[in-house]
């Protein structure tokens, strides 16, 4: 690994640690409220069952997000952002991979 790349990676790990310990605030945070998760699903014009299948989560997980019992994390948040911003493209890509 190049020294410059290693240094950048080490710096990122240190920053992540400081954020996790509450010593530093993250540069950005994506919050998905229950109404926002539901709005993304409705924008995609899918039922809970269809949307859950597309995201590869259980219907119960999706319901928990929409009813504020849980919050989507990691890859689920990223996928929701993609579907929210470019629903047609995201749905096309996800439906193709679902058929494979």
Image: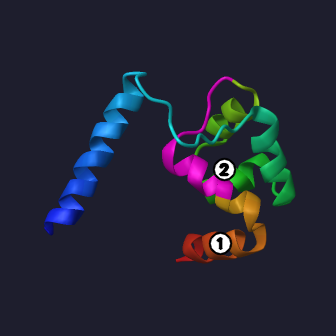
Q: Which mark is residue 1?
A: none
Q: Nearer the viewer, residue 27 or 92?
A: 27
> x and y percent of residue 81 in the render?
67, 55
Q: Quadrant of residue 92?
A: bottom right
Magenta stretch: includes residue 83? no
Magenta stretch: includes residue 78? yes
Q: Secondary structure at mark 2?
A: helix
Q: Nearer the viewer, residue 91 or 33?
A: 33
Start-end of magenta stretch: 69-81
Q: Quadrant of residue 30?
A: top right
User: Left or right of 88: which side holds 31?
Assistant: left
**How many numbered tags mark residues here?**
2
**Badge 1, how many Cα within 10 Å: few under 14, some, many 20+?**
few
Q: Nearer the viewer, residue 84 or 63?
A: 84
- The answer to whether residue 34 is visible is yes
The residue depicted at 55 percent of the width and 74 percent of the height is 97
Give the colouring mode of the picture.
rainbow
Location of residue 2 with respect to 75 vertically, above or below: below
Q: Which mark is residue 52?
A: 2
Q: Which mark is residue 95?
A: 1
Q: Nearer the viewer, residue 94 or 32?
A: 32
């Amino acid at each position: 690994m190049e020294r410059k790349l290693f240094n950048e990676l080490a710096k990122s790990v240190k920053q992540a640690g400081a954020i996790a310990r509450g010593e530093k605030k993250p540069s950005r945070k994506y919050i998905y409220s229950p109404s926002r998760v539901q709005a993304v699903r409705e924008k995609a014009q899918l039922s809970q069952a269809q949307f859950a299948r597309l995201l590869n989560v259980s219907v119960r997980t999706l319901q928990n997000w929409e009813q504020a019992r849980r919050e989507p994390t990691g890859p689920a948040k990223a996928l929701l952002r993609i579907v929210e911003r470019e629903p047609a493209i995201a749905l096309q890509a996800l439906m193709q991979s679902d058929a494979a």
